Image: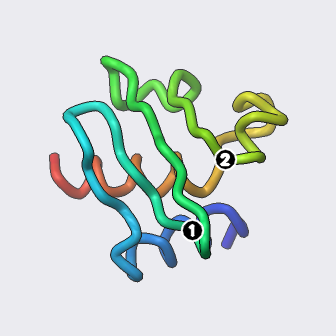
Amino acid sequence: MHPRLSGARTLIERGAITREERARFRVASGANRYRVEVPADPYAIGEYSCTCPWWMKHRGGRGPCKHVLAVCLVLKEES
């Protein structure tokens, strides 16, 4: 399994995902808290954003971070 996908599933299992608003989530990852913004189209994974160092460095150019993946999986389960 891809490491970021595995990390995303671990975050979900730990209950680390909290919805703040309709399109904003807080993700607890270790001692850090990151904010994930969901675009109008939740299936447009390239349009998400996260405040983590991975996202700030790569801006989705190397794929989504584990926080974005976790939120995507949570939204998929809800629908």
The residue nearer to you, when weighing 1 against 4, is 4
User: Which SS class for mark 1?
Assistant: strand
Q: Which residue is mark 2?
A: 52
Q: Is 27 drawn above or below residue 47 in the view shown? A: below
The image quadrant that residue 42 belongs to is top left
Q: Determine if residue 6 is in view.
A: no
Q: CA distance from mark 1 to mark 2?
A: 10 Å
In this picture the colour scheme is: rainbow
Going by the numbered disc 1, the residue's amino acid type is Ser
The answer to whether the residue labelled 1 contacts the one labelled 2, judged by CB atoms less than 8 Å apart, is yes
The image quadrant that residue 15 belongs to is bottom left
User: Which SS class for mark 2?
Assistant: loop
Image side of residue 17 versus residue 9, left or right: left
Q: Which residue is mark 1?
A: 29
Query: Of the residues under marks 1 and 2, which one precedes in the sequence?
Result: 1
Q: Determine if residue 50 is in view.
A: yes
Give the crowd class for mark 1: few <14, some 14-19, many >=20 residues within 10 Å.
Answer: some
Q: Is 52 drawn above or below residue 55 in the view shown? A: below
Residue 30: % across, % down = 60, 75
Residue at the extreme left: 79
Residue 70: % across, % down = 46, 57
Q: Residue at x 31, y 18 (%)?
A: 40
Q: Residue at x 67, y 47 (%)?
A: 52
Residue 77: % across, % down = 23, 57
Q: Is 73 drawn above or below residue 50 in the view shown? A: below
